Image (cartoon, coloured by chain):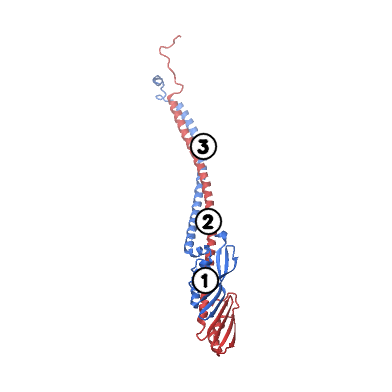
Chain colours: A blue, B red
Amino acid sequence: MDSVNKTDRSLEKINYVKLLIFLVVFIFIILLLISILILPNIKKYRVARGEFNQAMVHKTRVQSVLNEREKELKKLRLDNWKIFSAFKHDFSEEEFLAFTKQFFNKVSLKEVKQSSYTKEFEIYELNVTSSLKTPIKFYQFLNGLNHYNNIIQADFPIDLKSNGNLIYSSFKIKVYGLTPKKK
Amino acid sequence: MVRYSFIEPRKKPLVSSFSKIWILFISFVSVLLILFGFFLLFKIHSYKTDAIKTKNSRILLEKKINDKDAYMEYLLRQKSLGEEIYTRNTLLKDSIKNLFDLVPDKITLNRVIIKKASLVIYGKTPTKDTFNFLLSAPLKSIFSTSNTMFYLTNSGWYNFVSTNKIASTDGFSE
C-alpha cells in the first residue's frame, strides 16, 4: 500500500474534470433513485397511512358506540334484573303453592292451557281455587304476585263467594315465560 | 529482461484514491436511498394490511352492536311486558278494593263475579232503597249498563243480583 500511496497523488492534486464528472454522476444517480424509488413510494406511503388512520378513526368511533351500548345494556339489566330473572325462572306448581299458602288457606291449581303469546313469550294458564279469611288477603296476594319469582298475572274471571267465615275464590292466573329457544 | 528504467517498476493503481472515495461515497448514498425505498415499501405494505385488519375488526364491532341492539330490544320487550303485567295486577287489586270499599255496611255481599267487561254481584240488602241509593248509584256511574233484580226473603230482607257491564273493550278497571 505504501508504494501505491507514494505514486497516487490524486488526492493532493485534484483533477477538476474528474471531480466535475463524479459530481454529475453523483447527482444523476441520486436524482434517478429519488425519482424512481423514493418519490412515488412516498406518495403511496402517504395514501396508505391516510387510509390506515381513517380506518382507525372509524373503528374507534364504532368501538365507542359499542362501549356505550354495553353500558346501556348493563344498566338496563341492573335496573330490571327482577323482571328478567322472573321471565327466565321456570314455573313450578309446588313453589307457587308454597307462595299462595301465605295468603290462602286451601289452594288447588289446575292447568288450563299452554300457548304462545308472541314468538318470544309463552303463557301457561292455570285456574286457582282457594279459600281465604278476608279480602285483604286477596289484595296482599295480588301485591305479592308482583314480587314473585315468575311473571304472573291474575286474570278474569274472578269469582269470590262468601261461605260462613271464609271466602272461596276462583280465578285464573297467566304465567308468562320465554319461549325455550330464547332463554 | 532488458531494463529501460533506473527505478523499479511500480504498480499503477487502476483506480485512484480520489475515484475510490467518490465511488464509495456514491455507493454508500445509493445504498442508503435504496434501503430507504425498501423501508417505504415495507411501511406501505404494513399500513395496508393494518388498514384491512382494522376494517375487519370494525365490521366485527358493528355486528356486535347490531346483536347488542337486538338483544336490548328483546330485553325492553320483556321489561314492558313485565311492567304491564305488574300494572294489571295492581290495577286489579285496586279495582277489587274499590268495589269492596263501595259496599256500605248495611249491604252484605254473597258472591262477586268479575269478568273482563262485567261485574255480577249477589247480596242481601235490608231495603231496595238502601241498595239503590248506596250501591246502585255508584255502580251506574262506573258501568254503562246496570241491572238489578230483587228477591224478597222470609226475613224481610232482599236478596239481589246486580249485573253490570262495560261497553268499552278496556275492561273492568275501576
Can you tell which mark lies on residue B65? Answer: 2
Label number found at residue B120? none
The residue where tag 3 is placed is: A37
Of pointers 2 and 1, the one earlier in the residue sequence: 2
Residues at marks 1 and 3, CA–CA distance in whole angstroms: 75 Å
Question: Dot 1: what SS?
Answer: helix
Mark 2 Cα shell of 10 Å, populated few (<14), some (14-19), many (≥20): many
Q: Position of residue B136 (x, y in %)?
A: 56, 85
Picture coordinates of residue B60, whole percent (x, y)? 53, 51
Q: Nearer the viewer, residue A20 or A116?
A: A116
Q: Vertically, is A156 above or below B42?
A: below
The residue mark sitting in front, 1 or 3, is 1
| Chain name for mark 1 | B
In the rendered image, the quadrant that contains the C terminus of chain A is bottom right
Query: Quick one: label 1, few (<14), some, or many (20+) residues within 10 Å?
Result: some
Percent across and percent down for residue A14 are 42, 25
Q: Tell me the element at label 3.
A: helix
Which amino acid lies under the numbered mark 1 shown in the image of this protein? Answer: Thr
Between B169 and B42, the one nearer to me in the picture: B169
Q: Spatial distance from mark 3 to mark 2, Cα to Cα?
A: 44 Å
Q: Residues within 10 Å of mark 3 (few under 14, many from 20)?
A: some
Q: CA distance from mark 2 to mark 1?
A: 32 Å
Residue placed under numbered mark 1 in the picture: B87
Location of residue B147 with respect to A158 vertically, above or below: below
Residue mark closest to the camera, 2 vs 1:
1
